[in-house]
Amino acid sequence: MWAIAKSTFQEVYRKRIVHVIAVLTLLYWGILGFIVYSQPREFGMSESLIGALINVSSLISILGFYLSSMLLAFLTVMLSVGIISSEVEDGTVLTLLTKPIRRYEYVLGKYLGIAIMISIYATVLFSAIVLFAFLGKQNFFQVFGVWAMLKGFAFFLLQPLAISAVAVFGSTIFKTVNNGIFVIALYLLGTIGGLMEQIGGFANVPDLTTFGILASLFAPFEVIYRKLISSIFANVGGFTSLMGGSMTGGPGTEPSIWMMVYVLVYMACAIGFAVRRMNRRDIG
């Protein structure tokens, strides 16, 4: 399994999409750094603590965590959708499975290789957000607490890991292009569902709230983002309701810990179904 994970990591590292994402990340950092640098007073010299937090949270939530999550999700989808199906289509998997490698080791190794790659990228992105906030005269670890930031990082990493689990499962069923459509559709469903849930709760429209909850059960990616934001801002009291909303930072409620347990079960089921599907698949 570890040999498969290592070869998968090396394989995805050589893909052109990784280099494209690296360029986009540098451009994104340049824009974010310019905004922070050009408005130092608004981030460090507000009339009150709440005013300062509003300024920083607006930047970090929309230009920081939100766009970083999108970049991370895009990289995850592009690297994961063909991780198994492409090797089935070109016959590479036949060579691999003739060696003393069980099929479940093959699937787990593929997922682990992707997970290592996106974990490294997520760590770099999260560290950059904290650094830019520091340049904006806000020490996140001092303002929100070390534990809150560590929890935020855990949820920041959890989202792409959940997406890649679904993508690996889809890769055992669909061809690469079809799997890409499937995963992107699920991601959009989760985003729209989360937005509908927040709008329904804010406007007291039960039907919208119900649709959002059901969508989140099928695609719980946006829920993880809301948990990320609400965890970081938990120590600021009223800010939980302000920043724990949709991916645009709107009003909302903090997802419960049971929803996060559901996400972990969701991921385990996706990988389990991928292993089961691979064991039953005729690739001869």
Image (tube, rainbow, N blue to C red):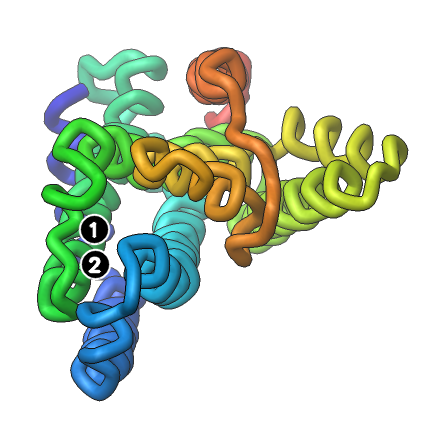
- Taking depth in this image into account, of 278 and 59 the one nearest to the observer is 59
Disc 1 to disc 2, C-alpha distance: 5 Å
Relative vertical location of residue 75 with respect to residue 24 in this rendering, above or below:
above
Q: Residues within 10 Å of mark 2 (few under 14, many from 20)?
A: many
Q: Which mark is residue 129?
A: 2
Decide if residue 29 is on the left or right side of residue 135: right
Q: Which image quadrant for residue 18?
A: bottom left
Identify the residue at horizontal 13%, vertical 23% (top origin): 2
Identify the residue at horizontal 32%, vertical 56% (top origin): 53
Q: Position of residue 4 (x, y in %)?
A: 19, 29
Q: Secondary structure at mark 1?
A: helix
Q: Position of residue 97 (x, y in %)?
A: 29, 23
According to the picture, the residue beneath numbered tag 1 turns out to be 126
Q: Residues within 10 Å of mark 1 (few under 14, many from 20)?
A: some
Identify the residue at horizontal 12%, vertical 66% (top origin): 137
Instruction: Kindly indicate whether the residue at mark 2 contacts the one at mark 1 (C-beta within 8 angstroms).
Output: yes
- Answer whether residue 273 is visible to the viewer in this image: no
Q: Which image quadrant for residue 165?
A: top left
Identify the residue at horizontal 68%, vertical 42% (top origin): 198
